[in-house]
Image (spheres, grey):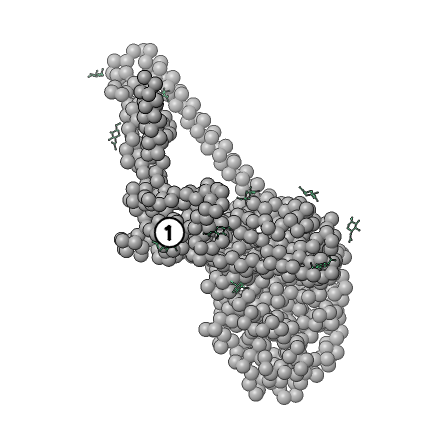
């Protein structure tokens, strides 16, 4: 009796287990390990043999851990989670760089190599922690790329929890498609000034919200062995769906699934049809969802019928309706109208009244909705600094009146809804799209980075700067739009690309002769001189570099990208900003003392001149260490009187070598370490204009155009300068945001 009972019980249990099993489709190939420790390993991943689709999808399950731990291929990279949506989470380690009071250094630079999978650029961030910390992440992305950030603090009490904006902690994003990287940490001063509170710098890549900065992380060594989760993107192969489909034997998507091209335009992944669930990479993997059991979509009186990929609700005989809970349900049909009683008339009247009421409610709903949309736009307008802008515009005079505020739809139509094919470029502050307005004007539209409140100020800043500027060598702002979630700026479209492109792109560089380079330099100098002295409030651009000088069809220079620029009102002695700029162009004095003056632009412009003279890049890893930073290398060669070695051979000829020397001497003065020893932008512009006007005269030696010209022009220059140099000092909190621009990677 007892035996029979337990057999029956066992059978019941087995049946329950079997049905339970049947309702969760298999994830691994038959005969393969379905998991390792707590991690499920779905095909195309597997633990060897035919269990993984290719070698890249191989997972080592190390059984000497309890629970067992999975690792990516044969590496020591631990896998946390594999999702069939094309993502994979791994654990990454931390780089460190530690010092003690006797200057002893102990460090670890992380090198992470992922064979096929790339770091998801929107799910992860690069973070560095420390008070004397310069962190770099470098790798290959087809070409070499590098990015990084700077974190400094004078006193450990300055840091605030949760804020990674350059004081004690800094963050930057990771570009798309990165498969391997090195994290390197350096310090300026071996942490001497911040010991013993901050002995170490740390840097790591982690999922966006996984790490929150805490001031206690600055203090100890505790971080060294911390690991952080990183999300990777995976995909099958390197071909698109269309190409992959034609190779039927190797096509990875099985029945009842769709093929989806990966975002990176190489490779694809598979997705079960709607109404199916399971593993689309396995034959029989996508199984029909029994909606009648799982979601119970039908009205209680209706019968639910599960169908492949869908379901059907049917009402009992004599009833009407679609049978769905969310639809019309099941109800008895109306009584015959032809023999209706007065009572039915009343009912009819009531229902017509009811119908009217419903229409009224709908109308009201529509109006409320419309109001909500308007409110949202108004909110965005406020959030995007619309109010700030309106205030700013009303308090300042001298701004251009023709700056237009665009409606959101206008710009959506102009850019084909911000289609990817319209992207012109992506920079630190946003994405630039090409658009065509309704009146056929071609414009460039800059969309700043989503939802970052710190960008709002920069954005308003850029509008304020450009509203005050009207110069033929400065890109013209046509208007802006504040009604969208992310603020938008509309510029005139400059047709011919950046100076960087013309100088450093091998195909076109030879077409930029010296005369053109000199003219571009003169125009840029004039634009900067105008910004510094002629505009109603002095403006420091702060990010002068080749990539921010655009060229039109006649190779006329147009200075752009005013996101970092500052207005320095002459009645304010100090302003607080963030140290910003591009590595290689950044004024060393400004970096060191944090005092912002127009002379920082002079330095950056000097670097631009050097680039025009030499045709070389500002920072280049192909050059040996001491030659890496162009400005320093250039100055050291000039000191040894070896200038000719570095001049761009494409522009040097017998006729212009004297002029090149003059420009080189000018460039050298621009990049002097002490700001006060550099010439003003006005002087630079005058000298360059002078050289352009009398080219290649044997007697136009450096003397006349140099010191003597300065003397002759002295009065004029002084009137322009008066007040500008002395009053426009600004103080920067040591809170840094520096872009590294290497080997043309942007
Ligand atoms: C799975 O990975 C292992 C280890 O790299 C490899 O030997 C095997 O060939 C892979 N399977 C397939 C089908 O490529
Ligand atoms: C598993 O992990 C242990 C401890 O880290 C290591 O010694 C061993 O080599 C690993 N085994 C395999 C197969 O990787
Ligand atoms: C710094 O570390 C080195 C190596 O561990 C050690 O020899 C030295 O005594 C340390 N100095 C101080 C001041 O702790
Ligand atoms: C990372 O560093 C290692 C060793 O220092 C070096 O061999 C490798 O080429 C570097 N990788 C990248 C992507 O820079
Ligand atoms: C840091 O700030 C604290 C409080 O503001 C002060 O007591 C301390 O002397 C400062 N330390 C340094 C090194 O300036
Ligand atoms: C960060 O990720 C690790 C590993 O997945 C997890 O244990 C930890 O709870 C996460 N922390 C936060 C704050 O999300
Ligand atoms: C930051 O948080 C840590 C731990 O949560 C706490 O010990 C520390 O006092 C906090 N620091 C500040 C500046 O609030
Ligand atoms: C679903 O049921 C309706 C009747 O309720 C029937 O007309 C229709 O053909 C059914 N659909 C399918 C796909 O069977
Ligand atoms: C089924 O439909 C009828 C008519 O639309 C409705 O009165 C009834 O409440 C519905 N029943 C359920 C359980 O939704
Ligand atoms: C409805 O009325 C018409 C005309 O009076 C009649 O022919 C029909 O049979 C009636 N139908 C029902 C269901 O009563």
Figure quadrant of residue 24 = top left
Indicate the quadrant of ligand 6 in the picture.
top right
Tell me residue 170's x, y (percent): 62, 53
Residue 108 visible in the shown view: yes
Pointer 1: what residue? 48
**Which residue is found at the position 44% from the left and 48% from the top?**
61
Residue 413 visible in the shown view: no
Q: Is residue 542 above or below residue 343?
A: below
Q: Is residue 254 above or below residue 691?
A: above
* Image quarter of the N terminus: top left
Which residue is nearer to you in this view: 600 or 117?
117
**Which residue is found at the position 55% from the left and 66% from the top?**
742
Judge from the rendering whether residue 611 lies leftward or rightward of residue 158; answer left or right.
left
Total tally of numbered discs in the picture: 1
Tell me residue 26's x, y (percent): 35, 40
Q: Residues within 10 Å of mark 1 (few under 14, many from 20)?
A: some
**Which residue is found at the position 65% from the left and 46% from the top?**
214
Which residue is nearer to you in this view: 553 or 204?
204
Q: Is residue 539 above or below residue 35?
A: below
The extreme top residue here reads 342
Whether ligand 1 has any atom under 8 Å from the Cβ at mark 1 is answered as yes
Judge from the rendering whether residue 496 lies leftward or rightward of residue 28; answer left or right.
right
Q: Is residue 227 above or below residue 318?
A: below
Tell me residue 608's x, y (percent): 60, 71
Which residue is nearer to you in this view: 489 or 642?
642
Which residue is nearer to you in this view: 265 or 718?
265
Tell me residue 648's x, y (percent): 55, 79
**Which residue is found at the position 58% from the left and 69% from the top?**
619
The kind of secondary structure element at disc 1 is loop
């Amino acid at each position: 009796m007892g035996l029979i009972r337990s057999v029956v019980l066992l059978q019941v249990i087995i049946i329950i287990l079997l049905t339970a099993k049947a309702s969760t489709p298999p994830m691994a190939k038959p005969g393969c390990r379905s998991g390792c420790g707590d991690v499920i390993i779905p095909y195309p991943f597997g633990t060897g043999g035919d269990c993984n689709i290719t070698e890249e999808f191989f997972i080592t399950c190390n059984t000497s851990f309890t629970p067992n731990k999975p690792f990516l291929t044969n590496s020591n990279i631990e896998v946390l989670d594999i999702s069939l949506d094309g993502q994979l989470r791994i654990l990454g380690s931390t780089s460190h760089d530690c010092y003690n009071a006797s200057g002893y250094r102990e460090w670890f630079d992380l090198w992470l190599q992922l064979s096929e999978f790339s770091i998801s650029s929107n799910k992860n961030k690069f973070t560095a922690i420390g008070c004397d910390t310069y962190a770099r992440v470098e790798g290959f992305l087809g070409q070499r790329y590098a990015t990084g950030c700077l974190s400094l603090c004078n006193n450990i009490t300055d840091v605030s929890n949760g804020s990674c904006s350059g004081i004690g902690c800094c963050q930057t994003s990771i570009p798309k498609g990165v498969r391997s990287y090195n994290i390197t940490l350096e310090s300026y001063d071996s942490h001497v000034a911040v010991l013993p509170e901050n002995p170490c710098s740390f840097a790591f890549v982690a999922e966006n919200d996984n790490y929150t900065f805490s001031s206690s992380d600055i203090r100890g060594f505790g971080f060294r062995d911390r690991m952080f989760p990183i999300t990777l993107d995976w995909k099958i192969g390197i071909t698109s769906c269309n190409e992959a489909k034609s190779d039927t034997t190797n096509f990875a998507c099985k029945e009842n699934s769709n093929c989806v091209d990966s975002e990176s335009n190489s490779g694809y992944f598979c997705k079960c049809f709607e109404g199916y669930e399971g593993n689309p990479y396995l034959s029989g993997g996508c199984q029909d969802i029994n909606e009648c059991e799982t979601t119970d979509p039908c009205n209680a009186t209706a019968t639910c019928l599960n169908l492949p990929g869908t379901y059907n609700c049917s009402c009992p005989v004599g009833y009407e309706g679609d049978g769905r809970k969310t639809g019309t349900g099941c109800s008895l049909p109306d009584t015959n109208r032809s023999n209706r009683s007065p009572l039915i008339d009343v009912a009819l009247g009531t229902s017509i009244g009811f119908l009217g009421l419903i229409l009224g409610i709908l109308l009201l709903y529509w109006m409320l909705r419309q109001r909500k949309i308007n409110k949202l736009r108004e909110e965005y307008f406020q959030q995007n600094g619309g109010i700030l802008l309106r205030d700013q515009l009303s308090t300042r005079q001298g701004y251009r009146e023709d700056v237009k505020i665009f409606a959101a739809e206008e710009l959506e139509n102009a850019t084909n809804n911000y289609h990817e094919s319209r992207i012109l470029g992506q920079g630190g502050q946003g994405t630039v799209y090409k658009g065509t307005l309704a009146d056929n004007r071609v414009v460039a539209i800059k969309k700043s980075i989503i939802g970052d409140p710190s960008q709002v100020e920069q954005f308003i800043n850029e509008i304020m700067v450009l509203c005050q500027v009207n110069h033929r060598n400065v890109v013209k702002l046509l208007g802006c739009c504040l009604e969208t979630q992310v603020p938008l700026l509309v510029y005139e479209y400059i047709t011919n690309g950046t100076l960087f492109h013309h100088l450093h792109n091998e195909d076109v560089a030879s077409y930029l002769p010296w005369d053109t380079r000199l003219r571009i330099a003169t125009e840029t100098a004039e634009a900067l001189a105008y910004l510094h002295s002629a505009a109603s409030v002095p403006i420091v651009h702060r990010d002068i570099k080749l990539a921010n000088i655009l060229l039109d069809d006649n190779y006329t220079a147009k200075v752009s990208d005013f996101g970092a620029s500052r207005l320095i009102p002459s009645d304010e002695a100090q302003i607080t900003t963030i140290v910003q700029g591009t590595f290689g162009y950044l004024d060393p004095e400004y970096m060191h003392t944090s005092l912002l003056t127009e002379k920082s632009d002079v330095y950056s412009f000097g670097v631009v001149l050097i680039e025009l003279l030499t045709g070389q890049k500002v920072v280049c890893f192909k050059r040996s260490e001491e030659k890496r930073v162009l400005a320093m290398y250039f100055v050291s060669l000039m000191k040894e009187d070896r200038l000719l070695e570095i001049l761009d051979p494409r522009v040097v000829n017998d006729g212009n070598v004297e002029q090149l020397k003059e420009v080189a001497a000018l460039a050298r003065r621009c990049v002097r370490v002490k700001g006060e020893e550099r010439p003003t932008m006005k002087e630079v512009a005058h000298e360059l204009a002078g050289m352009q006007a009398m080219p290649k005269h044997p007697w136009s030696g450096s003397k006349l155009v140099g010191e003597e010209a300065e003397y002759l022009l002295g009065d004029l220059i002084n009137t322009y300068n008066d007040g500008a140099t002395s009053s426009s000092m600004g103080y920067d909190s040591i809170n840094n945001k520096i872009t590294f621009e290497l080997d043309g990677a942007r």
